[in-house]
Amino acid sequence: MENISNEELSKINAEILEHMMHPKNYGVMEDANGVGMAVDKKTGEFAMVYIKIEDNKIANITFGVNAC
């Protein structure tokens, strides 16, 4: 990171913050035709991925997370 200017780093940090505060593709997809789940057995935290396939292509994909 030593080759990144403070101005560039500030832009990167702003973009990360924007994604954190306004995530895209977040939420449960009611009409998903595929669902994946990963669980941390120690903490009970989990992540879900929902996918909708149409005409052999990804039409939509969303995710949900229950973690710190």
Image: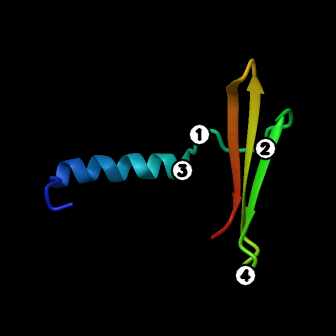
Discs 1, 3 touching: Cβ within 8 Å: no
Between discs 4 and 2, the one toward the N terminus: 2
Q: Residue furthest top?
A: 55
Please name whichever residue, 9 or 48, is drawn nearer the observer in this view of the structure: 48
Give 67 or 46, whichever is nearer the viewer: 46
Q: CA distance from mark 1 to mark 3?
A: 10 Å
Please tell me whether mark 3 sits on a helix, a strand or a loop.
helix
Q: Residue at x 57, y 45 (%)?
A: 23
- Tell me, yes or no, whether the two marked residues, 1 and 2, touch with CB atoms within 8 Å: no
Q: Which residue is mark 3?
A: 21
Q: Quadrant of the N terminus?
A: bottom left
Q: Which residue is mark 2?
A: 28
Identity of the residue drawn at 75% across and 28% down: 53
Q: Amino acid at mark 1?
A: Lys
**Disc 1 and disc 4 in contact, CB within 8 angstroms:** no
Q: Position of residue 18 (x, y in %)?
A: 46, 46
Q: Residues within 10 Å of mark 1 (few under 14, many from 20)?
A: few
Tell me the distance, in whole angstroms, between the alpha carbons under discs 4 and 2: 24 Å
Q: CA distance from mark 4 to mark 3?
A: 27 Å
Residue 60 lies, in percent from the top left, at 69, 30
Q: Position of residue 29 (x, y in %)?
A: 79, 38
Amino acid on which the number 2 mark rests in the picture: Val
Read off the residue under disc 1.
24
Q: Earlier in the sequence, mark 2 or mark 3?
A: 3
Tag 4 residue? 42
Looking at the picture, does residue 10 appear above or below residue 38?
above
Mark 3 or mark 4, which is nearer the start of the sequence?
3
Q: Of discs 1 and 3, which sits in the foreground?
A: 1
Where disc 4 sits, the SS reads loop
Question: Residue drawn at (42%, 51%), measured in percent from left and top?
Answer: 16
Q: Nearer the viewer, residue 36 or 7?
A: 36
